């Protein structure tokens, strides 16, 4: 399969092929407009039966961002002071309503849309796991309550967002033997 198929013909496919996970962010905060565009892309993700079970926490407050980073590091068993968000100034957290059977898939699609949207706007991003554990904890539930989030939500992922520090890497070669035709 030629990876160039559709390229230069379709910007969405270009974004899918060129997006990379960013593991080194500048301290500069993206603009409100950029972050809102990324969030909006997440809100327009496909969802099972159109239920729109995913919600997004837009975290730009440094104290809350650092608190979430510390909770995430604790879940992963990392040494104190580790930043699982790689220095990203903003974190967009996706959660989804547990009572919707497709909530994990719905939230995953929202995450995917946001990662692609960030790249299309010239931003770096990375999906950081452990949102389920962070927001399943007493402290995580307290954060949701403080933010006025009501309901039973499961954390799906943290989309760390900011400007690239350094160059975006080239895509690695695609592993062969992953497509079967019938």
Image (spheres, helix red, strand yellow):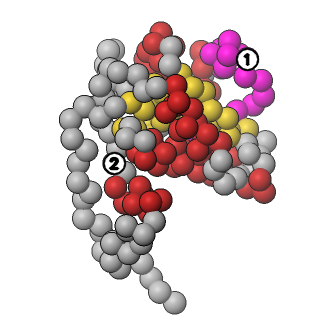
Image coordinates for residue 93, horizontal then vertical, percent: 56, 31
> CB of mark 2 within 8 Å of CB of mark 1?
no
Tell whether 80 sits left or right of 16: left
Residue shown at the point (65%, 47%) measured from the top left: 44
Image coordinates for residue 76, horizontal then vertical, percent: 41, 29
Q: Nearer the viewer, residue 54 or 15?
A: 15
| Label 2 environment density (alpha carbons within 10 Å; few <14, some 14–19, many ≥20) | some
Specify the label residue 172 is tagged with: none
Residue shown at the point (66%, 20%) measured from the top left: 144
> Is the residue 14 above or below the residue 129 in the image?
below
Residue shown at the point (73%, 55%) measured from the top left: 48
Tell whether 148 sits left or right of 160: right
> Is the residue 83 above or below the residue 12 in the image?
above
Specify the label residue 20 is tagged with: 2
Query: Which residue is most to the bottom?
Result: 182
Does the magenta-highlighted stretch encompass residue 154? yes
Look at mark 1 in the image and give the residue it sits on. Answer: 148
Image coordinates for residue 117, horizontal then vertical, percent: 49, 45
Dot 1 falls on a residue whose secondary structure is loop
The answer to whether residue 35 is seen in the rendering is yes
Distance Cα–Cα, label 2 vs label 1: 33 Å
Q: Quadrant of the N terminus?
A: bottom left
Residue 29: quadrant of the picture: top left
| Label 1 environment density (alpha carbons within 10 Å; few <14, some 14–19, many ≥20) | few
Dot 2 falls on a residue whose secondary structure is loop
What residue span does the magenta drawing correspond to?
141-156
Residue 94: quadrant of the picture: top right
Image coordinates for residue 31, horizontal then vertical, percent: 46, 26
The answer to whether residue 93 is seen in the rendering is no
């Amino acid at each position: 399969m030629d990876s160039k198929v559709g390229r230069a013909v379709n910007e969405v496919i270009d974004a899918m092929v060129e997006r990379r996970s960013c593991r080194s962010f500048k301290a500069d905060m993206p603009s409100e407009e950029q972050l809102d565009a990324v969030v909006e892309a997440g809100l327009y993700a496909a969802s099972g039966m159109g239920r729109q079970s995913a919600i997004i926490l837009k975290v730009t407050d440094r104290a809350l961002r650092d608190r979430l980073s510390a909770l995430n590091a604790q879940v992963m068993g990392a040494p104190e002071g580790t930043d699982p968000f790689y220095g990203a100034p903003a974190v967009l957290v996706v959660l989804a309503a547990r009572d919707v059977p497709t909530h994990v898939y719905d939230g995953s699609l929202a995450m995917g849309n946001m990662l692609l949207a960030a790249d299309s706007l010239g931003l770096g991003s990375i999906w950081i796991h452990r949102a389920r554990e962070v927001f399943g904890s007493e402290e995580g539930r307290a954060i949701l309550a403080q933010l006025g989030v009501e309901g039973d939500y499961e954390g799906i992922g943290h989309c760390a967002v900011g400007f690239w520090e350094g160059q975006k890497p080239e895509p690695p070669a695609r592993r062969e033997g992953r497509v079967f035709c019938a």
